Image (cartoon, grey):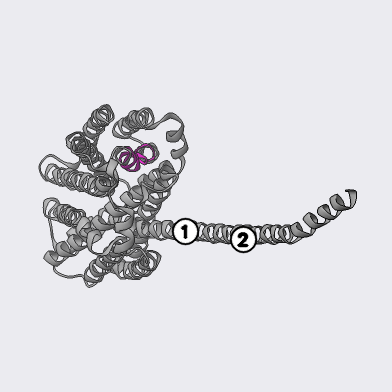
């Protein structure tokens, strides 16, 4: 009996040996498949990490290219105010006639912002990055020949067309990046640095008794570099990538767009007043300092750079303050402090104090434009924010042209001493429009 049980046990054991072997081989196969899956997942994670790092590096390149673009734009924008007295003398123009440079540039800017959406829908961000600097090259090449005045007006229109493309497009693009407040500060701070450099370069050209249009020959080099750098940085941002990033999601398909439209117009009104104050300082301060304050020509010409030095410092250093206290409170405080600085600038008889308070006005006006873009972009979805920012910036540029033109009329009839009165009123209106914008947002 024992032998039969033993034999039966051996038989069962022998019968199950192949089964145990099969189980071992199956476990081994499962382990191998798991290892393969793990290695595949690890390789995929590594590829994604490399891709993420590359995109992060690519974003840095784009931000640097955009900063250079805004730097070049700033050089051109502030050179107009410094060269205005020389251009008046060269063409035998009155203040009113010369002031028509400003609305022509703004008409070009508005056309550029209006056509931006069409450019993006056809060519993506790459189209914007190529068209804007190309138009700058055309404008600077035209001005560099010292052409008849009506051609000068056309050149400023072309420059405004390119600036409208780049300004509205870049602001919309950068508002969706991580740390948008910091990025906007860097971009607009670069514009302010260009606004410092432009007048200094103009003064250097004029001091060696060269004609005013020699400045624009130098600018040709900068605009060609701008074209190369910007087009190279955005070379992969074609229509396919643009449409993929802006494909509307179900939650973004809203029907009630009326409140958002109101926000765009309120932002445009805020920009209208702000750019009126900024362009008044930029375009008329050198002439004002020379005629009314009787400063020497070099000091008067550099007053625009001093204003933009304050702008640059404000945009670089007030960003963390704005981040901490929030947009509504911070910007309201900046406007009040800017109004105080402008009031001292108006009342003081000292040129040194006037220049110091002028830089203070620039310092507190610095965060205005990027703050408006950020507040607006927070309330608009992907489908709305490009057109919304473009429309608000375009409307703002009308104020940027209107205020200097009005001051030109006043200078011919009442005298340029009323520049400070106009700017003081604009500061008060700026605070009112900002409070209204924040209330509805």
Q: Which mark lies nearer to you, 1 or 2?
A: 2
Q: Earlier in the sequence, mark 1 or mark 2?
A: 2
Q: Nearer the viewer, residue 295 or 35?
A: 35
Instruction: State the mark number for residue 33.
Output: 2
Q: Nearer the viewer, residue 82 or 271?
A: 271
Q: Main structural element of the magenta stretch: helix, strand or loop?
A: helix
- Which residues are drawn in magenta? 361-375
Alpha-carbon neighbours of circle 2 within 10 Å: few (<14), some, or many (≥20)? few
Disc marking residue 220: none
> Which residue: 35% across, 53% down?
195
Q: Position of residue 54 (x, y in %)?
A: 50, 61
In front here: 352 or 20? Answer: 20
The answer to the question of whether label 1 and label 2 lie on touching residues, with beta carbons closer than 8 A, is: no
- Image x and y of residue 221, in percent: 35, 70
Residue 382 lies within the magenta run = no
Whether residue 409 is situated above or below residue 61 in the rendered picture: above
| Element carrying mark 2 | helix
Please state, as top left, top right, bottom left or bottom right, where the C terminus lies in the image: top left
Query: Label 1: how many residues lie within 10 Å, few (<14), some (14-19) or many (20+)?
Result: few
Q: Is residue 438 among the parts visible in the rendering? A: yes
Residue tagged 1: 55
């Amino acid at each position: 009996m024992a032998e039969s049980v033993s034999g039966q046990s051996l038989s069962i054991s022998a019968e199950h040996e192949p089964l145990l072997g099969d189980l071992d081989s199956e476990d081994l196969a499962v382990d191998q498949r798991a290892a393969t899956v793990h290695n595949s997942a690890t390789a995929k994670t590594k590829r994604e990490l490399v891709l993420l790092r590359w995109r992060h590096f690519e974003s840095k390149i784009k931000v640097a290219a955009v900063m250079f673009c805004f730097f070049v734009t700033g050089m051109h924008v502030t050179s107009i105010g410094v060269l205005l007295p020389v251009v008046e003398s060269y063409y035998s123009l009155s203040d009113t006639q010369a002031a028509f440079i400003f609305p022509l540039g703004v008409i070009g800017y508005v056309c550029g912002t209006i056509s931006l959406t069409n450019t993006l829908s056809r060519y993506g961000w790459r189209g914007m990055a190529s068209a804007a600097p190309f138009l700058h090259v055309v404008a600077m090449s035209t001005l560099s020949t010292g052409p008849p005045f009506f051609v000068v007006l056309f050149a400023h229109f072309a420059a405004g067309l390119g600036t409208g493309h780049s300004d509205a497009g870049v602001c919309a693009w950068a508002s969706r990046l991580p740390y948008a407040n910091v990025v906007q500060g860097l971009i607009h701070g670069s514009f302010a640095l260009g606004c410092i450099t432009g007048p200094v370069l103009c003064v250097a050209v004029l001091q060696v008794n060269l004609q005013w249009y020699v400045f624009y020959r130098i600018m040709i080099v900068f605009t060609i570099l701008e074209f190369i750098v910007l087009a190279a940085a955005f070379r992969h941002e074609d229509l396919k990538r643009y449409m993929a990033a802006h494909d509307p999601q179900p939650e973004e398909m809203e029907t009630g767009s009326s409140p958002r439209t109101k926000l765009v117009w309120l932002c445009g009104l805020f920009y209208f007043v702000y750019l009126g104050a900024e362009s008044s300082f930029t375009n008329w301060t050198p002439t004002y300092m020379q005629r009314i304050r009787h400063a020497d020509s070099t000091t008067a010409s550099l007053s625009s750079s001093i204003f933009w030095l304050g702008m640059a410092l404000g945009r670089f250093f007030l960003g963390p303050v704005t981040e901490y206290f929030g947009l509504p409170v911070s910007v309201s405080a900046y406007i009040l402090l800017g109004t105080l600085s402008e009031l001292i600038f108006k009342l003081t008889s000292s040129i040194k104090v006037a220049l110091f308070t002028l830089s203070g006005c620039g310092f507190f006006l610095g965060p205005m434009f990027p703050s408006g873009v950020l507040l607006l972009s927070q309330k608009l979805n992907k489908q709305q924010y490009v057109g919304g920012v473009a429309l608000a910036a375009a409307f703002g540029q009308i104020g940027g042209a209107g205020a200097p033109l009005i001051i030109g009329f006043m200078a011919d009839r009442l005298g340029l001493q009323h520049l400070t009165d106009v700017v003081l009123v604009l500061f008060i209106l700026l605070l009112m429009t900002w409070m209204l914008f924040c209330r509805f947002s």
